[in-house]
Amino acid sequence: MPPLPTLLAAPLPVTETPLDLFDADAQARFEVLQQRLAGQFSRIFPNPNKPRTVVVVPSLSLDTEELTKIDGVHHYEERMLCLLMLLRLPRTRVIYVTSQPVHPTIIDYYLNLLPGIPGNHARRRLTLLSCHDASPLPLTQKILNRPRLLARIRKAITRSEYAHLTCFNTTLLEKQLALALNIPLYATDPALAYLGTKSGSRAVFKEAGILVPDGFEELRDATDVVDALVALKRRNTALRRAVVKLNDGFSGEGNAVFPYDGCPEGAALEGWVREALTHQLRFEAKGETWAHFQTQFKEMGGIVEAFIDGAVKRSPSAQFRVNPLGEVIPISTHDQMLGGPSGQIFLGCTFPAPSAYRLEIQRAGHRVAEVLRDQGVLGRFGIDFISVKEGDTWKHYAIEINLRKGGTTHPFLMLKFLIDGTYDATTGNYYTPAGQPRYYFASDNLKDPAYRGLTPDDLIDIAVYHGLHFHGTTLEGVAFHLIGALSEFGKLGVMCIGRTPERAQFFYDETVEVLNRETR
């Protein structure tokens, strides 16, 4: 397939690394490094007893201002602690680097979840390193700024030909780190980052022949926004609301809803929209203002599209991986739990998506994944949809591509590591080794002011006393994440696995009830 000209002509995202630090020679060296992945995937990945080293750098190398909209965001580096479960492979080493040290109780919690591996054996193969830096800089930038820390990471990599780097998302920073460590990056080249923006997503969806909401991409300023809002309303006079989205917004925090309530018809519409935009836009992020939002829009651009209404509406997503051999692998489907003023902020998810449409979502996502593969995308990514029930059928609108790990990544990885079962792409279910299905309910945002002050040790005490565990015998139960955010923000993540969706929901409700009772 020929490249999409509108995608490859798009500007690269702004990072802390000047473009001239990644010249043609650096790009050539990076491409040579990346060629190792195919060999690793063929020779090492299929054999659990082969030696390997995984360097985990959970840097959120995203727009700093957007990150500040998320409570406890500096603790989100803990979400990739699920990769400590790789230590169940007896000759695998994990090097995990963070901005600040992770509480020892949190590390013990994950190591004690490992099935079939003594904790001290796993700990000998785990190297924890920290920048001791709480600044808002991306973690990867902090590492690059510390040559002695880089040297310690390199020393911990026993054989670079058996090692790779994994990150939350990729920018030029992660690319530079891969070169500094002399190991390949198992992720998409950041030169393709545009494909995961709101504008890039719409272009990919159209190339894949997937339905998208009526709208406009490649918008650059407030004038473009006004023109798009006017054009949408004139094309559909019954339209009640539109959504304005920052290109690089995430978790719904960069979205705003524009209601057309009280708008005039005819020539007066444009003037009304221009004036109403300054005070009528409803932001998903707390404390956002038009002045600030307008500045961000000018910096990163964005889209305007019709708000999808429906009496019965869901927000499913499909996850895929393109492996180093170029194969598209379906990973999972989810139904997303959304909150915020208009239901656009990601709070959690259920697995799998309902049987009524999970395979439809997977098929549509597969078409998108093939377009991304043909553009050179590598690693994990997700495609979000809005689905509306019309009679006895569902209509699915593709909304965005998350060209990175996301809120559905760590719960599914935990399911995979804890259950050691199989995802069946023909049914969309996950099965235990005995052939029994498993479901989960996961949230990044179990939050209550009363939980503030609970330390990691307090949480573990409560969990032990009330039996809030994952049980290896029944392959059901509760696992926590984002534990470090609990004391300061009263917020943590929880994943509840059950043999039925109702059992998974029961475990979640029980967890909430116990925490509320213990903190009142």
Image (cartoon, rainbow, N blue to C red):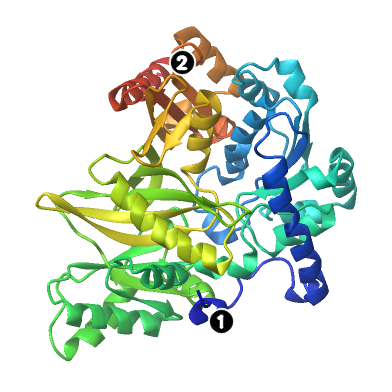
Q: Measured along the vertical axis of the image, is residue 378 above or below residue 471?
A: below
Quadrant location, the C terminus = top left
- Circle nearer the viewer, 2 or 1: 1
Could you tell me which residue is drawn at 45 percent across and 18 percent down?
475
Q: 421 left or right of 127?
A: left
Q: 14 left or right of 327?
A: right
Q: Residues within 10 Å of mark 1 (few under 14, many from 20)?
A: few
Q: In the image, residue 287 lies at what x, y percent?
A: 42, 57
| Residue labelled with disc 2 | 468
Q: 351 left or right of 486?
A: left
Q: Which mark is residue 9?
A: 1
Q: In the image, residue 14 lies at what x, y percent?
A: 63, 70
Q: How many marks?
A: 2
Q: Whole-Å distance between the Cαs marked 2 and 1?
A: 51 Å
Q: In the image, residue 241 lies at what x, y percent?
A: 22, 67
The residue tagged with tag 1: helix, strand or loop? loop
Q: In the image, residue 33 lies at what x, y percent?
A: 78, 58
Q: Measured along the vertical axis of the image, is residue 265 above or below residue 480?
A: below
Confirm or deny contact between disc 2 and disc 1 (CB under 8 A).
no
> In the depicted view, which residue is nearer to us: 504 or 464?
504
Q: Residues within 10 Å of mark 2 (few under 14, many from 20)?
A: many
Q: Quadrant of residue 504?
A: top left
Kind of residue at disc 1: Ala
